[in-house]
Image (tube, helix red, strand yellow):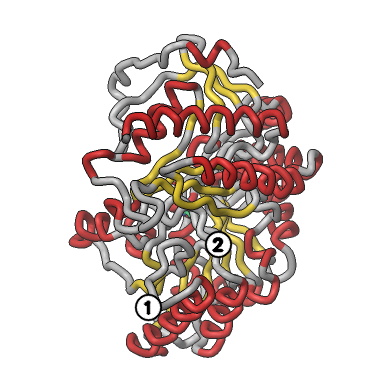
């Protein structure tokens, strides 16, 4: 398929005025004015294929009319009430939908306004549950290195990123980390399976080293996000982790902020490993597909009831469970179910990975392609033979995303922990993507890497 002429327009760079948003690797922002389906347009009329669904959030694409109608309908009724005294039809409906989709054992849903808040909610519910059930010594939350759980201090404390620890460590209580079972950068002497075993064993060793009765929970992304580049572990890792947590009475928390809400082809990524379900799950991003700030913690009665009986959950936010965001969430999930977008994520994801792997074979700088459903990553290396990454000065993944943006393709990039664990771009388009659109994605990505590799020769 020929690249559309709209892609040829120059990127519209505008000063971002007083909006203070530029993050690492992104010194400029670009003003957008319109979105439809998997595309959005800047104020210059230039079109972008949303190859990473923003920050892996826009699961049902842009400009969805069902969502727009639901927003108007709810706004015509009521947008906000305080959750501690009032609920609404939309909030009740959304919580029921989420718990039903999550399945048995995920009986109750606590709504919040995003991923970090959802993670905070899970950490606090776990802690309060331990205290009210006579285990006040349990306070340590183990997590993985690398890993990402959010920007607030509680979530940052369990995030596995040495750069963030160095910057924010003095104002938070950094929690112990164990190695994530990386599948590409494996220490010599291991293969993927034996390294995953080793990492699960490390979890057990760390629990014992900390004192088993002081450990409250283990939090992990079942399919990795930006910190690992869509890491998927071998199946036995999940069951081993579950067994270890059970052995020591430790709660297992799955952070499905990025991988949940249908992105991997099932409502929860956890559903891919039904024998290793977690105790608590958090979702966000795809739950509202970017149409409103929304997140959720999903918990079993056995935990929630104990906390409620003890006097109530000592936690909440002003916008938790607001009727407007809830109505949007209901519309997003309804759209996902009616259009079988989870099925599409599975089918299109498999096709996308096949084509990405073909591109990798032709490329000199794509070292690895991995992921599940439509949560995938393309890892960038300087040397495919020894997996060496580019020097910090090159900022290679950010340069690739810059070239892609010039061509009309948005890609979310990360040089994780200053490149200690590699660098990659997320290949995670909206779940509505079609086969011809996958071809256009691949065509733009191929051209992107052709230009990048020309620059690096
Ligand atoms: N957890 C994971 C796995 C994430 O990917 C993110 C965001 O990217 C978060 C938590 C934090 O979510 P938010 O940015 O909505 O606070």
Residue 182's tag is none
Residue identified by numbered label 2:
232
Crowd tier of the residue under label 2, counting other residues whose Cα lies within 10 Å: few below 14, some 14–19, many 20 or above: many
Quadrant location of the C terminus in the rendered image: top left
Across and down, in percent, residue 90 comes to 69, 43
Of residues 102 and 276, the one nearer the viewer is: 276
Q: Is residue 404 above or below residue 217?
A: above
**SS of the residue under disc 1:** loop
Residue 88 visible in the picture: no
Residue 92 visible in the picture: yes
Of residues 223 and 110, the one nearer the viewer is: 223
Of residues 324 and 411, the one nearer the viewer is: 411
**SS of the residue under disc 2:** loop
Quadrant location of the N terminus in the rendered image: top right
Residue at 40%, 85% (x, y): give it.
Answer: 207
Residue identified by numbered label 1:
139
* Side of 412 where 95 appears, left or right: right
Question: Which callout, 1 or 2, points to the residue nearer the camera?
Answer: 2
Across and down, in percent, residue 396 comes to 33, 40
Across and down, in percent, residue 431 comes to 67, 40
Q: Sequence-wise, which precedes: disc 1 or disc 2?
A: 1
* Side of 371 where 28 appears, left or right: left
Residue at 51%, 62% (x, y): give it.
Answer: 221
Residue at 66%, 46% (x, y): give it.
Answer: 349
How many labels were placed on the picture? 2
Across and down, in percent, residue 157 comes to 33, 63
- The CA distance from mark 1 to mark 2 is 28 Å
Q: Quadrant of residue 35?
A: top right
């Amino acid at each position: 398929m020929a690249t559309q002429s709209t892609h040829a327009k120059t990127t519209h760079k505008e000063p971002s005025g007083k909006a203070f948003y530029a993050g690492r690797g992104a010194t400029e922002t670009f003003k957008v004015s319109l979105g439809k389906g998997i595309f959005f347009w800047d104020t210059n009329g230039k079109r972008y294929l949303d190859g990473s669904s923003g920050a892996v959030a826009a699961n049902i694409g842009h400009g969805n009319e069902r969502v727009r109608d639901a927003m108007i309908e709810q706004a015509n009724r009521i947008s906000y009430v305080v959750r501690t005294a009032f609920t609404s039809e939309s909030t009740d409906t959304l919580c029921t939908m989420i718990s039903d989709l999550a399945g048995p054992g995920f009986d109750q849903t606590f709504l919040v306004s995003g991923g970090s808040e959802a993670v905070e909610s899970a950490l606090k519910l776990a802690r309060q549950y331990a205290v009210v059930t006579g285990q006040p010594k349990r306070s340590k939350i183990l997590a993985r290195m690398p890993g990402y759980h959010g920007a607030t201090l509680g979530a940052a404390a369990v995030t596995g990123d040495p750069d963030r620890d160095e910057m924010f460590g003095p104002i938070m209580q950094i929690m112990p980390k164990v190695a994530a079972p990386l599948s590409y950068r494996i220490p010599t002497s291991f293969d993927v399976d034996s390294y995953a075993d080793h990492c699960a064993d490390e979890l057990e060793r760390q629990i014992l080293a900390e004192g088993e009765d002081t450990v409250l929970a283990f939090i992990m992304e079942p399919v990795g996000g930006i910190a690992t580049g869509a890491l998927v572990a071998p199946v036995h890792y999940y069951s081993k982790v579950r067994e270890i947590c059970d052995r020591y009475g430790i709660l297992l928390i799955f952070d499905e902020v990025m991988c949940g809400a249908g992105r991997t082809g099932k409502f929860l990524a956890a559903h891919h490993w039904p024998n290793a379900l977690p105790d608590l799950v958090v979702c966000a991003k795809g739950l509202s597909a970017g149409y409103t700030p929304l997140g959720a913690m999903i918990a079993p009665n056995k935990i929630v009831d104990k906390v409620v009986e003890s006097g109530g959950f000592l936690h909440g936010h002003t916008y938790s469970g607001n009727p407007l965001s809830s109505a949007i969430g209901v519309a997003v999930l309804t759209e996902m179910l009616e259009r079988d977008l989870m099925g599409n994520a599975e089918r299109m994801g498999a096709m996308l990975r096949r084509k990405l792997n073909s591109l990798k074979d032709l490329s000199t700088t794509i070292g690895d392609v991995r992921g599940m459903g439509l949560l995938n990553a393309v890892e960038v290396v300087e040397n495919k033979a020894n997996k060496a990454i580019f020097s910090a000065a090159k900022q290679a993944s950010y340069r690739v995303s810059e070239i892609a943006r010039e061509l009309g393709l948005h890609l979310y990039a990360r040089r994780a922990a200053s490149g200690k664990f590699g660098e990659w771009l997320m290949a995670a388009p909206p779940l509505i993507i079609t086969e011809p659109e996958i071809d256009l994605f691949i065509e733009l990505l191929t051209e992107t890497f052709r230009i990048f590799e020309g620059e690096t020769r």
